[in-house]
Amino acid sequence: MKLLSIDTIPGQEFEALGMVKGAIVQTKHFGRDFMAAMKTLVGGEITAYTDMLNEARQIAVKRMVDEARQLGADAIVGIRYGSAQMMQGAAEVIAYGTAVKYK
């Protein structure tokens, strides 16, 4: 399935089927969370959180694609991501866009 952040597919006509989304609330293991807190003392990338958010985005996109497939979509356009901290060490990630069917 073609996934695009733009609202059109150059050279392709399509009809919009509707908005699709995928979401997840993900957390890291307490031990990793503690080590991440220690990292803030010295600075630098907190790879445990980077990995957590990358994994969460992948899951959110898969759920969005699954929803689009149920509608019979060929592609999703206008894809956007959002995220929010739900609690210490836990983040919600959402992926959403418009499912489309080629004409």
Image (spheres, grey):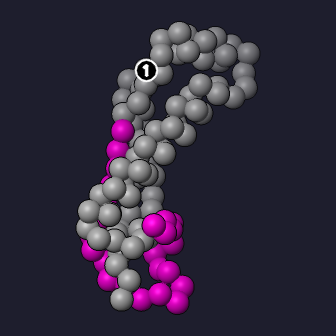
Q: Is residue 32 above or below residue 73?
A: above
- Residue at the spot 43% in from the left edge and 25% down from the top edge: 27
Residue 3 visible to the viewer: yes
Q: Position of residue 45 (x, y in %)?
A: 69, 28
Q: Nearer the viewer, residue 53 or 43?
A: 53
Q: Is residue 64 above or below residue 42?
A: below
Query: Which quarter of the figure is the N terminus placed in?
Result: bottom left
| Residues drawn in magenta | 1-24
Going by the image, does 86 lie left or right of 51? left
Q: Residue at x 67, y 16 (%)?
A: 39
- Residue type (three-letter) at the residue carrying disc 1: Gln
Q: Position of residue 47 (x, y in %)?
A: 64, 27
Report the front residue among 35 and 76: 76
Q: Is residue 95 above or below residue 39?
A: below
Query: Label 1 crowding class (10 Å Cα cut-off): few <14, some 14-19, many 20+?
Result: few
Q: Is residue 86 above or below residue 2?
A: above
Residue, disc 1: 88
Q: Is residue 78 visible?
A: no
**Element type at marker 1?**
loop
- Residue pictured at 45% horizontal, 62% vertical: 79
Residue 94 counted in the magenta span: no
